[in-house]
């Protein structure tokens, strides 16, 4: 009995020592049940910002259709859009700024919709994960911690800590496990309903009364100013990669564990970029008409940053090459017309849909902190 008590005391002592390695400038009580003896990153890279449970997570939220959606949100408001088996849902980035995570289901598929405003990272993951020899249905919430200014997520199953931008477990029982990314787009409300008239958008009636009062406003005024930097209390300015301005918006693509990024400014100038990355044929579209949620206090007064979408250029057995003519995307092989969502609405290929190449939007400083070996597209 004494021996078991002794081992238990040693274990608790080690936990206390390990938790002390995590940055905790506000001396917030460590109430997480995470097994911090298992970790694949330095604990000193993690910072406790808020107590556990501080963020109200959007669990299985309510949705409205096109008519109510267009009156509830303004046309240029950005959303994360995802379509599975013919059904589509959209999640306002502005609402997600206040909550950061939504656990939801689409067409019977459990999805995890995430957005970290400090890194401008919006990504959708699959909430299924195999561990202990079986498939598990996961639920997540913000942990109240950051690493490299990026949200650290917490799964409610094991209280393992996960890096939002990477979808990788970094501390806890499930250390090094990875979540599967689900292809999604960040587009405007108008673009969403143009493509998916039967689609649904997450309602502003979330049930969180205090949060509801602030929907439509931005708590990070001028955060994405081109001369700005990430908040130094969350990101050491000496770690900023000098190859790109820190708040430059980028999109990433992946091929066999290698990454390439493209800046919004390059894509906007060209309108269309046809590229090949390690044998993967991709095309990037830019279209104006979507605002930033990190600019002005009232987001409907914010600057237009446009929509960037990334697709595979292979359609069936054909490899397509695209141009932009009079705000319309066209493939030079058939002169068919395509919209920003990769849907062909006119021409020989009418009704065809390009496959979304899994990608996400980020600020350059954040992406390059996690993936410094990324290749950067040069025009």
Image (tube, rainbow, N blue to C red):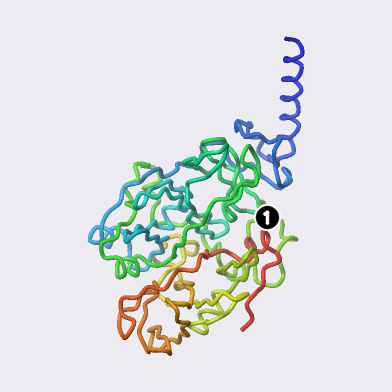
Q: Residue furthest top?
A: 1
Q: Is residue 237 left or right of residue 205?
A: right
Q: Residue at x 60, y 53 (%)?
A: 150
Above or below 104: residue 74: below
Quadrant of res 343: bottom left
Q: Nearer the viewer, residue 364 or 209?
A: 364
Q: Is residue 49 left or right of residue 100?
A: right
Q: Pinpoint residue 289: horizontal percent, then vertical percent.
A: 39, 74
Q: Residue at x 65, y 50 (%)?
A: 147
> How many marks do you count on the picture?
1
Q: Pinpoint residue 112: horizontal percent, then vertical percent.
A: 46, 50
Task: Assign the C terminus to one quadrant of the image.
Answer: bottom right
| Residue highlighted by disc 1 | 235
Q: Residue at x 48, y 78 (%)?
A: 313
Q: Pinpoint residue 348: horizontal percent, then vertical percent.
A: 32, 85
Q: Pinpoint residue 58: horizontal percent, then vertical percent.
A: 41, 45
Label 1 Cα neighbours within 10 Å, binned few <14 / some 14-19 / many ≥20: many
Q: Nearer the viewer, residue 346 or 365?
A: 346
Task: Assign the N terminus to one quadrant of the image.
Answer: top right
Q: Nearer the viewer, residue 111 or 224?
A: 111
Q: Is residue 335 left or right of residue 228?
A: left
| Element under disc 1 | loop
Quadrant of res 74: bottom left
Quadrant of res 231: bottom right
Above or below 317: residue 238: above
């Amino acid at each position: 009995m004494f021996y078991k008590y002794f081992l238990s005391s040693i274990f608790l002592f080690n936990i206390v020592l390990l938790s002390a390695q995590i940055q905790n400038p506000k001396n917030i009580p460590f109430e997480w049940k995470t097994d911090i003896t298992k970790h694949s990153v330095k604990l000193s890279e993690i910072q406790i910002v808020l107590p556990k449970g501080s963020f109200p997570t959007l669990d299985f939220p309510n949705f409205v259709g096109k008519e109510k959606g267009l009156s509830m949100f303004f046309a240029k408001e950005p959303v994360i859009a995802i379509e599975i088996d013919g059904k589509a849902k959209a999640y306002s980035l502005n609402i997600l700024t206040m909550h950061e995570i939504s656990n939801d289901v689409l067409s019977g598929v459990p999805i995890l919709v995430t957005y970290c405003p400090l890194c401008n990272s919006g990504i959708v993951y699959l909430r299924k994960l195999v561990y202990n020899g079986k498939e598990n249905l996961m639920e997540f919430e913000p942990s109240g911690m950051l690493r490299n200014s990026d949200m650290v997520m917490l799964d409610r199953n094991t209280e393992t800590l996960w890096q939002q931008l990477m979808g990788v477990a970094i501390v806890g029982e499930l250390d090094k496990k990875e979540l599967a990314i689900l292809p999604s787009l960040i587009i405007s409300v108008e673009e969403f309903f143009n493509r998916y008239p039967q689609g649904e958008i997450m309602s502003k009636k979330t049930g969180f009364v205090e949060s509801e009062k602030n929907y439509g406003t931005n708590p990070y005024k001028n955060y994405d100013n081109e001369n700005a930097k990430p908040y130094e209390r969350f990101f050491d300015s000496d770690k900023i990669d000098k190859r790109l301005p820190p708040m430059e918006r980028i999109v990433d693509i992946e091929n066999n564990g290698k990454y390439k990024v493209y800046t919004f400014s390059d894509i906007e100038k060209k309108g269309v970029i046809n590229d090949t990355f390690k044998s993967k044929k991709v095309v990037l579209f830019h279209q104006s008409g979507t605002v930033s949620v990190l600019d002005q206090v009232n987001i409907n007064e914010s600057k237009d940053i446009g929509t960037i979408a990334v697709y595979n250029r292979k359609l069936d057995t054909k490899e397509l090459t695209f141009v932009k003519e009079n705000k319309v995307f066209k493939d030079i092989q058939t002169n068919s017309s395509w919209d920003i969502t990769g849907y062909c609405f006119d021409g020989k290929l009418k009704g065809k849909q390009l496959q979304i190449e899994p990608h996400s939007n980020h600020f350059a400083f954040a992406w390059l902190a996690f993936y410094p070996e990324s290749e950067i597209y040069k025009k």
